[in-house]
Image (cartoon, rainbow, N blue to C red):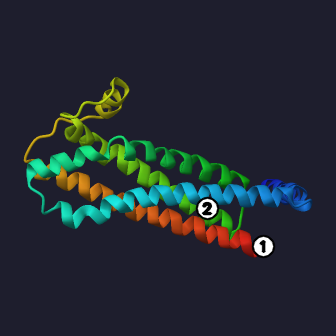
Amino acid sequence: MERRLHLRRLYRVGEHAMYAAYYQDGSGRNSMRAFMIVTLLLVAITMALSLAHALELPGKLRLKEATYKSVQAIYYPGFTIGGFAEIGGIIALAILLYLTPYPGARFWWTLAALVFLVAEHATYWLVTHPVNNFWVQDVAVSKPAATFFSMLRRKQSGDWKDVRDVWEASHVAKAGLAMLSLISITVAATFFAGSE
């Protein structure tokens, strides 16, 4: 047990020495600052897209079936392309977490941001995506898009309002998780700025 604690202390000392050497000439700090800004931007795009869907909810609940289905088709391809920000944000947060010294407040806030964004993305694949095919089934899409939308497809039963409610609720949940991720990485960034 004592040996394990001693090795853990040596690892931390070595880790802090590595970061100190990296930041010594200032170029490492500038690189980390630039990477933090890119990460914040990717998480903010993810939050903005999810929030846009959530803010449409009150108005969309008033639409009749034909109008609602027409409106649903307008999201492709714009929001699909914007979805790459989610993947980019997850990758950027994972890299940032790896580069952040452990332990420390900035590490834990970055970890929280990553967990929230992964949960947001998982909500898409587990709840939103299975019903997306329902909305684009009558829309002419490319073969790659048709393949994408058919992944994890579930046969939809029941009223179209049931599918609508699942889709809309998933976007409210995604917006909340993305907002928590953005708040967390912003708090982490303030710790980074405060360490100058």
Q: Label 1's element?
A: loop
Disc 1 + disc 2, Cβ < 8 Å: no
Which residue type does callout 2 highlight? Thr
Q: Residue at x 69, y 72 (%)?
A: 191
**Residues under labels 1 and 2: Cα distance?**
15 Å
Please, is residue 164 above or below residue 192 in the view?
A: above
Total label count? 2
In primary-sequence order, the first of circles 1 and 2 is: 2
Q: Residue at x 91, y 61 (%)?
A: 24
Graded by Cα atoms within 10 Å as few (under 14), some (14 to 19) or many (20 or more), the crowding at tag 2 reads: many
Q: Residue at x 65, y 60 (%)?
A: 37
Residue 8's quadrant in the figure?
bottom right
- In the rendered image, the quadrant that contains the N terminus is bottom right
- In the rendered image, the quadrant that contains the C terminus is bottom right
Please, is residue 31 above or below residue 81 in the view?
A: below
Inspect this view and state whether residue 2 appears. Answer: no
| 149 lies left or right of 165 | right
- Residue identifier under label 2: 110
Q: Residue furthest top?
A: 143
- Residue identifier under label 1: 195
Give how far across and how far down residue 47 sits, in percent: 45, 60
Give how far across and how far down residue 53 sits, in percent: 32, 58
- Seen from the viewer's position, the closer of residues 49 and 161 is 49
